[in-house]
Amino acid sequence: HLRWLQKEVGFRTCRFHAVFHDDMDVVRRRSDGALVYQWHHVDKVYDTLLSLGMRPFVELNPMPAALASGSTTMFDYGMNITPPRRWEEWGDLVRAFATHCIERYGLPEVSQWNFEVWNEPNLSCFWTGTKEDYFQLYAHAARALKSVHPDLRVGGPASSKASWLADLIDYCSSNSVPIDFLSTHLYPQD
């Protein structure tokens, strides 16, 4: 379906939920507590998008069960919407993911992608943490991405109804956290 749609419309990017969903099998915890990353499902999706002439607009979410502080999920497909148990592990996941993307697709390609931290964290159906928790999530992700390469583009808050935009700018400015773009969602009923 996407191949047909791409021929008809010619999209430049594709944004979708759940690149870190447990169905994508990106991270698991070994019996000794160490995290193991694997990217085979992500590679299949991104390989396909790129073969169709689309770049991923990467939405960094949801929280993999191996990292999650709780078990609250949303909708029928069970995206975990809790903060991480350990903030550093979230940063490690994002860093490992960005490193893999550059190794597989090259910096010239990946530096054209947008990495958006989470989706609509201002809505309780998408995020169980507080606004301050989201800012920590954002900071760990942004610093992890920039530690891989400063040309990687990071932004957010991908909020609903233009919420938290000024707050995120203020937070990033006050705490020397990188931000390259702002994102929000407006719907016809807003």
Image (spheres, grey):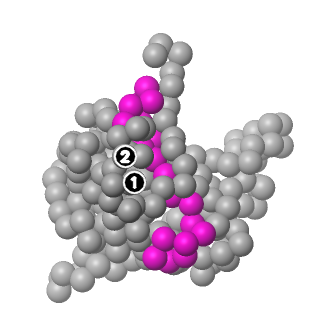
Q: Give the image location of residue 92, x and y in percent.
A: 35, 74
Image quadrant in which you'd find residue 136: bottom left
Tell whether 32 sits left or right of 2: left
Answer above or below: position of 161 versus 30.
above
Left or right: residue 161 compared with residue 35:
right
Q: State the residue in front, 103 or 107.
A: 107
Near-viewer residue (80 or 103): 103
Splitting the image into 4 quarters, where does residue 168 fall?
top left
**Where residue 170 is drawn, which disc sits there?**
2
Give the residue furthest to the right: 7
In magenta stretch: residue 148: yes
Q: Which residue is mark 1?
A: 173
Q: Which mark is residue 30?
A: none
Secondary structure of residue under mark 2: helix
Extreme residue in the bottom direction = 32
- Kind of residue at badge 2: Asp
Left or right: residue 143 versus residue 127 is: right
Q: Are marks 1 and 2 in contact (CB under 8 Å)?
A: yes
Instruction: Say which quarter of the image contains residue 8.
Output: top right
The local crowd at label 1, few if under 14, some if 14 to 19, many if 20 or more residues have their Cα within 10 Å, is few
Q: Which residues are magenta?
A: 146-164
Q: Position of residue 124 (x, y in %)?
A: 26, 34
Residue 19 seen in render: no
Residue beneath the point at 70% across and 68% down: 109
Neighbor class of circle 2 (other Cα within 10 Å; few <14, some 14-19, many 20+) is few
Which residue is found at the position 34% from the left and 80% from the top?
Answer: 36
